[in-house]
Amino acid sequence: MGSPFDLDRDADYLQWRDAKRERHPRQARDLVVDVADPRSLTSAERQALLERCASANMAIYRSPLLDEDKEIPRRLAQQLGLQRLDANWLADDDGISRIEVAQQLGDRSTFIPYTNRAINWHTDGYYHPPERQIRAMVLHCVRPAMAGGENALMDHEMAYIALREANRDWLRALMASDAMTIPERLDEDGVARAEQSGPVFFVDPESGTLHMRYTARTRSVLWKDDAATRAAAAFLQQLLAADRPDVFRLRLGSGMGLVCNNVLHDRAGFVHDPNEPRLLYRARYLDRVATL
């Protein structure tokens, strides 16, 4: 079988599409795996997580561990083949980010993840260069918000199918190397992050797997100025705004977490309680989740 992501290979695509639809979970609870200790998975627990990542590019684990312990997501990730941690500039020294409301003004307080505001649809690291593409992530919940903070999740392969079924030229436009550009970010010292152009959908040359870099933001993003790209970007926004069965909505509770191949996701706004603040750990990886 050739690559199903080759726009000139319809037979291979249709075979892959039908198998993908058949095995894809029908509801959010189908993603959930109960684990006794994420730091030391049983073979059955590991297999169940890998099976869900194979079919939907994501899995949810649910455990009784309520500790503030970054070893929980780190050791879970290692057991699923995730080794190359991306230590972004707002992460802690160990490379794992504490996603919480910033308590004082500073770098973190100017970025939406460190507030209680809603975050629009995106994949993580969409502003990174190709050599730092985020291929997987773990999001571990220590404490949920008093109210709100739900996530919506969509397998990027299902978004690919929707686009290809709607208009192949739109998909071709989004696979162009200059489809989406993130402008440079400046700080008081000059250019903190260089401008980054790239495709929305791309195929990893080594593994042949499909990845996506995307943000639904309307500011700080430049779309290629042609009709196909503009139409494709508009279609994606409408797709993600729709009430679709392949968009899963859930709220992570204490001891729960998401492991995924950097699927599309958003976050609802939430009520911030300074006495019981929402806290999640985020670990982002240059690897994909291991295959079965």
Image (spheres, helix red, strand yellow):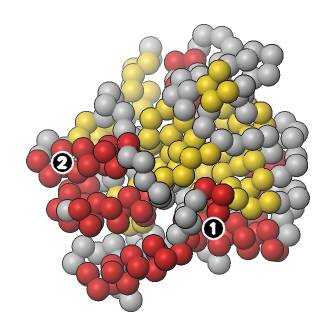
Q: As shown in the figure, which amino acid type bears the numbered disc 2?
A: Ala
**Neighbour tally class for label 2: few under 14, some 14-19, many 20 plus, Cα within 10 Å:** some
In terms of depth relative to the viewer, which is nearer, 154 or 227?
154
- Tags 1 and 2 touching, CB below 8 Å: no
Residue 261 spot, x, y in % from top left: 55, 59
- Direction from residue 156 to residue 112 in the image, left or right: right
| Residue 197 visible, this orientation | no
User: Residue 95 sits in which quadrant?
Assistant: top right
Earlier residue among tags 1 and 2:
1
Q: Secondary structure at mark 2?
A: helix
Q: Residue furthest bottom?
A: 1
Q: Is residue 91 above or below residue 261?
A: above
Quadrant into which the N terminus falls: bottom left
Does residue 18 appear anywhere in the picture? yes
* Percent coordinates x, y for residue 16 in the rendering: 40, 80
Q: Which residue is mark 2?
A: 231
Q: Is residue 250 left or right of residue 167?
A: right
Looking at the picture, does residue 251 appear above or below residue 163?
A: above
Q: Quadrant of the C terminus?
A: bottom right
Crowd band around label 1 with a 10 angstrom C-alpha radius: few (<14), some (14–19), many (20+)? many
**Where in the figure is residue 188, as x and y percent of width and height?**
44, 14
| Alpha carbon distance from label 1 to label 2 | 32 Å
Residue at figure coordinates x 47%, y 58% from the top left: 246
Residue at disc 1, secondary structure: helix
Disc number at residue 176? none
Which residue is painted at 42% across and 32% down in the image? 193
Residue bearing mark 1: 52
Residue 288, located in which quarter of the rendered image? bottom right
Residue 161 in which image quadrant = bottom left
Q: Please report the residue visible at 45 percent of the width from the left and 73 percent of the height from the top.
A: 21
Residue located 23% across and 62% down the image: 166
Residue 30 relative to residue 214: left or right: right
